[in-house]
Amino acid sequence: MCFGEFNEKINVVFKAILNYVSDISVTILVESLCKFVGSSDALVLEHLNIAAFTHKNLEVTEIGMLHIEEQEQKERLSSLKSAFGFSELMFLSTCNRVEFTFCTDQIVSQSFLTAVFETLYPNFTENQIETFSSSAELTSGIQAVNHILNVASSIDSMVIGEREIITQVRSAFERCRSNGLTGDLIRLVMRHTIETAKKVYTETSIAKKPVSVVSLAYHRLRDMNISLDARILIIGAGMTNTNMSRFLKKHGFTKFVVFNRTLSKAEKLAHDLHGQALPLSALDSYSEGFDVIISCTGADSHIITPEIYHNLLAGDEGRKVVIDIALPQDLDPQIIESHNVTHISVNVLQKISNENLKERSKEIAHVESIITASLEEFKQIHRIREVEIAMREVPEKVKEIRSTAVNEIFKKDIDMLDENSKDVLEKVLGYMEKKYMSVPMIMAKEILINKD
């Protein structure tokens, strides 16, 4: 065989191999696209559902009944997921909100929720199950995505602009993911939700001015430049004072004495603050002095009388600060008139809160515009992910085609080639393999994303 005939033989082999790989690869791509167009894949957005229980349709005490302790969530929610065939499930619980996000192709109705609650809460009475199954705010598909965007952006919250909700949503998702409850669709929704919420808090003033009484009280105290070694008396160990104390500890204050009617509660808060705990009855005999009093009890009369306040001063007539968050107030008004005291009352704080809420409400339109744009972005993100899932087998199929061509169908022909020709063929096949994986998939995304 002359040199020209040998080269012609190589060309024939190359063309045969490349035609084979090309024809079958195109077939695989077309099959994948057709499979996508007619598929009912697990990422179908219409399968996404949210059942929400909030302050808008239930009392906070009722919502609390739906709470599931973290250590119980994996077992109970996994059983629920299995019993109803949910492909994905997420559970969110806050002080005034409980939400179930789940993926199913079943019709979600009141009777469906009744069955869910009978399974998840076996100790509920028929009346309780009826109450919850009829009170759920149900959304599905793109409206479910819109709902969770509103929740994480805090415009669906009891207190508009409270940033804590974004942390609660993220933590709930991460917990459910680690428990093996969520999948690709909820992951996609949550990632986009967190990104959108961050954008809301960065680009708007929805959370700029504090509105909670505790937060406002802390800011007022911080603005007074009180020394971090100030002696602080905490009167009352309920949730309000507990939250206030945590603000103070985080800021660097270190000297705390906690008074409470139930000593065990005072001891618990004092332990968290590395402070001292005393019963409320010891207030009238306390003589160690103070710089700041923070008081919030449920008493129906003044806890701090002029006599008690005089004893608490221990002879120090310097300016003191009293933050009185109780209703009715714990501090006798006579004290304000006769002593050098800066008094911060809950009434003053509430007025500031109302003004700040008005300012936050002005930002709702701005937030809604961000969410509207975010919804459109999510539709694109979801569509791209659908294409990726439909075509995820393509790379492996193309590799199989190449392997079959080289190691089986054209093995004898390739064995006849010299090493240089084999190297060239390997490079050409490698190049084609990459292109068959990338170029058609990019084109498919562009076609399907713009498809009506």
Image (cartoon, grey):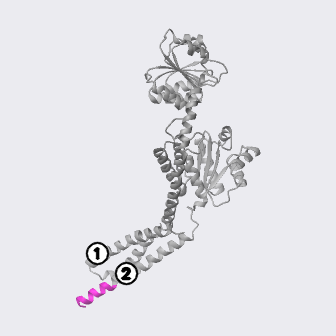
Image: 283 above or below 349: above
Name the residue at 31% across, 84% down: 11
Distance from disc 2 to disc 1, alpha carbons, whole Å, reads 14 Å
- Depth check, front residue: 336 or 86: 336
| C-beta proximity under 8 Å, tags 2 and 1 | no
* Quarter of the figure that contains the C terminus: bottom right
> x%, y% of residue 421?
28, 79
* Quarter of the figure that contains the N terminus: bottom left
Can residue 172 be seen by looking at this rendering?
no
> x%, y% of residue 432?
36, 74
Question: Which residue is label 1 attached to?
Answer: 423
Image: 58 above or below 142: above
Q: Amino acid at mark 2?
A: Ile
Judge whether residue 237 is colored magenta: no
Neighbours of disc 2 within 10 Å: few (<14), some (14-19), many (20+): many
> x%, y% of residue 309?
56, 13
- Name the image quarter holding residue 329: top right
> x%, y% of residue 380?
50, 61
Q: Amino acid at mark 1?
A: Asp
Report helix, strand or loop for mark 1. Answer: helix
Q: In the current view of this chain or complex, which residue is farthest to the top?
A: 315
Q: Is residue 166 left or right of residue 8?
A: right
- Depth check, front residue: 31 or 340: 340
Q: Which residues are magenta?
A: 1-12
Question: Which residue is label 2 attached to?
Answer: 17
